[in-house]
Image (cartoon, grey):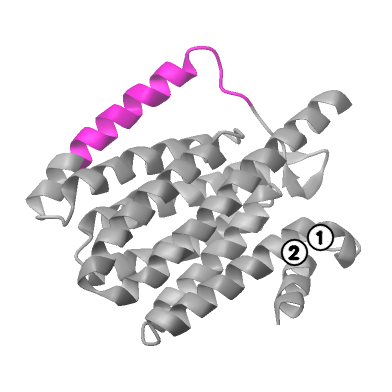
Amino acid sequence: MCERMLLFLEVLAVNRKALSNYFTRAERLLWCSSVLLITLSFCLFDRANYLTLVASIVGATSLVLNAKGNPIGQFLMVVFSLLYGVISLRFAYYGEMITYLGMTGPMALFALISWLKNPYGGNRAEVKVDQLKRGEGAVMLALTAAVTAVFFFVLRAFHTANLGVSTLSVATSFLAVYLTFRRNPYYALAYAANDLVLVALWGMASLTDPSYLSVVICFAMFLLNDLYGFVNWRRMQIRQSAAR
């Protein structure tokens, strides 16, 4: 099952490239392991909310493509944001719902456009890695603080569960989507930080409903994928810089 799904993704990703050459063996192993553990955790702890299972597999697939700098990954992130927003609504995690439907999803769409407009060397399956301009880091942090402050009051008005952690999730999510839009390798570390926040957030939810342990395991696997994404983007950055 894993091999068939990956072959389908490779057809979408590389067009004329030999399918077996697009994903490395490590990437195949990471994706298959992620899907396997996500599915097993769903069977053990949930077995009812199939939307969670579908969203988790879509998210894991998005991350392995994002790690390759492939724009299809951003398209799948838009899909994941929609699904995750619905899941968050069910548990009254309005912060997560608003964050993903109102920020992560739209920003993933902008990132998709940015990645499509900036292929590396004409290769549509790999985006051109970029760096932040001088002073842009300070602007990014100021925007993050402003967005987080606004969301805090909005989430408090909605009586969001676990308000503090939900607000922290907003901050890490904004950093991640901003850096993704800017095609910067550190987007993956920002997403990794967000994964840690979400593991804690859904871990607290699982104290009330054990079925949410499947979501905890999902974001734990996302953490591994995002860490790999950072490593691979650094490789891409070095390779692209050397070729200039």
Residue 132, located in which quarter of the rendered image? top right
Q: Judge the density around disc 1: few (<14), some (14-19), many (≥20) Cα neighbours within 10 Å.
A: few
Image coords of residue 225 (percent x, y): 59, 53
Residue at 71 percent of width and 49 percent of height: 68
Q: Amino acid at mark 2?
A: Arg
Whether residue 82 is situated above or below residue 67 in the rendered picture: below
Q: Is residue 138 visible?
A: yes
Distance between the alpha carbons at the discs numbered 2 and 1: 5 Å
35 displayed left or right of 47 = right
User: Which quarter of the rendering shows the N terminus?
Assistant: bottom right
Image coords of residue 17 (percent x, y): 89, 60
Image coords of residue 178 (percent x, y): 46, 36
Report helix, strand or loop for mark 1: helix
Residue at 32 percent of width and 70 percent of height: 87
Quick check: is 200 in the magenta stretch?
A: no
Q: Amino acid at mark 1?
A: Arg
Q: Residue furthest top?
A: 134
95 displayed left or right of 6 = left
Residue 25 badge: 1
| Foreground pick, 33 / 72 | 33
Whether residue 29 is situated above or below residue 141 in the rendered picture: below
Number of numbered discs: 2
User: Which quarter of the rendering shows the C terminus?
Assistant: top right
Write the start and end of the magenta stretch as one range. 131-151
Q: Judge the density around disc 2: few (<14), some (14-19), many (≥20) Cα neighbours within 10 Å.
A: some
Label 2–label 1 contact, CB within 8 A: yes
User: Which secondary structure type mostly characterizes the magenta part of the structure?
Assistant: helix
Residue at 46 percent of width and 20 percent of height: 137
Query: Which residue matches tag 2?
Result: 28
